[in-house]
Image (cartoon, rainbow, N blue to C red):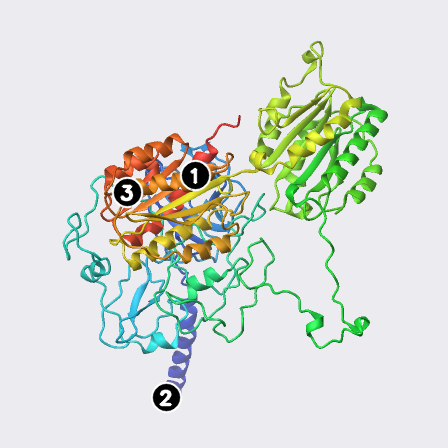
Amino acid sequence: MIRSITVVFYVFLLSWTCWAKPNGSKNKKPKQVVPDIECDVRAGKINLPEFIAKCPAHCKETKQQVYGTGVFASISSICNAAIHSGVITNSGGKVIVRKMAGQNVYKGSNANGVRSLSLPKWRESFVVSVGKPKKGVIYPSTLDYAPSRPTYVKTGPKDTRLAAFTTLPPTIAPEATTTTPEPTTTAAPTTTTTTTMPPPPPTTTKARAAVHKIRDAGLRRPEAGSAIRRQPSSPVGPAFPRRDWPPSSYSRPDWFPGARRPTDVSYAVPDSGYAWSETETPEIPARDLRPDISEYERWLYSFGPYPPRSTDIDGSHKMPLHLPHGNVEPVDAWKQDANPYESGFSLREPEALPRAPEPPASQGDPNCKVDLAFLMDGSWSIGKRRFKIQKDFLTEVAQVINVGMAGPMMGIIQYGDEPVTEISLRAHSSSKDVKSAIDKIVQKGGMSNVGKALSYINKQYFSDANGNRGGAPNVAVVLVDGWPTDRVEEASRLARESGINIFFVTIEGPDENEKQNLVEANFVDKAVCRTNGFFSLPVNSWFALRKAVQPLVKRVCDTDRLVCSKTCINANDIAFVIDGSSSVGTGNFRTVLQFVANVTREFEISDTDTRVGAVQYTYEQRLEFAFGQYNNKAELLNAIKRINYWSGGTSTGAAITFAAEQLFSKSKPNKRKIMIVITDGRSYDDVRAPALAVHRQGVIAYSIGIAWAAQDELEYIATDPDKEHSFFVDEFDNLYKYVPKIIHNICQEFNSQPRN
């Protein structure tokens, strides 16, 4: 009996222990570990869609740049954006960061002692909130920063190298080992070749210096084996991360969603530095389905110095692409329809030939590709007879302008007390259809609230959902009888900042006695895109309105003068002046071309947008390609890839003069002229006089020095102030740091220009 009781007791005790153990672990709540960040950390530097972090104190004093209000561009400092939003104070604290899509425009403002700047567009945004996670939500305890550079794995006796992209945390250093390394889970998709390769050599300072050894000896170059000299007065580069992206298995977000004029769709991330591999990769684990992928980009990711193969890795002729957006087409992605006469059909029986449906003929004038909205006056003061004259005027404009999908699209908003859409963009694809729709418009009546109408077109009318094409300038023509009955200045300013070109056609404006009745004096000058007379068209009487048809059509179709739709990324002539001297070397020259390509990717490329030219120089100069020679981004990037290394001396001054003669002498008057000079050493000729000459021509010059470049020459070349236009890096591999900085400076200068 005692024995039985003892057995039962032990069984009960054992059961209770097993039951209590998991229950006890349930009661333990996981603790949220909050990683610390510095004041200069930007949201784009961290590869997480949402995370928590702790900011230090006194970030406000660092004056790290912030772009936007409420929603910030990803190149903004996280901590200063949090102070600006009021989420934390200058004493620091925890914040939650959530990434989101890019915005059309970021408005600057001054809040909580932090001044944020305006930015026209950026590809990625983020918002900040108080660092108190919701119940049950645990954020990562460590932050996944972008990798700084690729590691190299030896492939065999030829000592070729394969760049293996890794995403190791910054605190973990690669260990040298003598055994075959096992594939890590944090690396990019591995291949069979990687797992059978010998181990990589240990990363040391000595080995790193060997990569950048001097290609040729010279009196002004350091001796072999010596450390590369750093300029004592060289500017400190911004803390932007380098991102060596592997081929992604998903589409990257469009960095300009809903943009006014996205001539080319770019999917690069803010601080990206695309690494060009030095050997052919055995296979591509995942396709990159980005809509704007080009042969250049495939070559960039998949091949080294070797040309692309005629077939893709999977054996198909070309990778199938889906192009829902933009107009950058991959090379060879389009093929002409097969000729039925070459397919075995007899010419004697033409009726038996299978006929593919023909695409509708493109209509409209392609030289006048604008999205045009007319704000017609429907107030009671206009009267029925004048309202009919106004409708006849709009009908004639539609016929003269030749409405069509390949050219101008035309819509109409009638305004009175409230604006009403009469004809939306893309509602009608021919002038005849527009005329029929205009005939059906009925006068609404009310006051002449032009300010409300301008707000309406800015917030609602020119949207993608309502037919905005994105690749065409937005134009709004306001017809007003007399004067507006509300204020127009603020509404028109916001519309202009969104890229809308505002024209005013004033009929029978106020005389001297009536000007005292104006709600806002000089309302036309306050509203139009520019006060140079081009955007305003006064008409003496309603019966003379018909005479304004031709002048108005000519103006709205002059896309080069539609300056309100011009932004910092679509209004430039950019010349790259590239050092091809023997001290650069073949490998480093490819790194320079990568830098040129990454800068180019940030701009909208076409003959009416940004144009790019390139000059390579040694003792002599060579024009690689001129402005307008390549008018889409895919062709231009391919041209950059094909630039051959020259090798020779260094005559930077002569190269600047050559660029001025061969490129900027053919620059369009409405383009901003920008020159980016890249050099790795002191010039054998004088740079001061040539630089001063191009400055006087209105060229904005940037100088980028590498390794042995002379600081005084960089300052002579650069436009004042030098610190905003002159940069220095000690190694070629650090060029990627200045891609976002250069783009930021170009946009900041553009946005600071006066309106008139």
Residue type for callout 2:
Ile
* Residue displayed at 42% across by 39% down: 674
Viewer-closest of 350 and 544: 350
Query: Dots 1 and 2: beta carbons under 8 Å?
Result: no
Question: Where residue 698 sits: x, y (%)?
Answer: 41, 32
Q: Secondary structure at mark 1?
A: helix
Residue 462 to residue 30: above or below: above
Residue type for callout 3:
Val
User: Considering the image in quadrants, where does the N terminus appear?
Assistant: bottom left
Instruction: Tell me if mark 3 has few (under 14), some (14-19) or many (20+) residues whose alpha carbon lies within 10 angstroms of its own.
Output: few
* Residue displayed at 49% across by 71% down: 310
- Front: mark 3 or 1: 1
The residue labelled by disc 3 is 236
The residue labelled by disc 2 is 2
The residue labelled by disc 1 is 664
Mark found first going from the N terminus, 2 or 3? 2
Question: Where residue 549 sits: x, y (%)?
Answer: 73, 30
- Cα distance in 3D space between marks 2 and 3: 84 Å
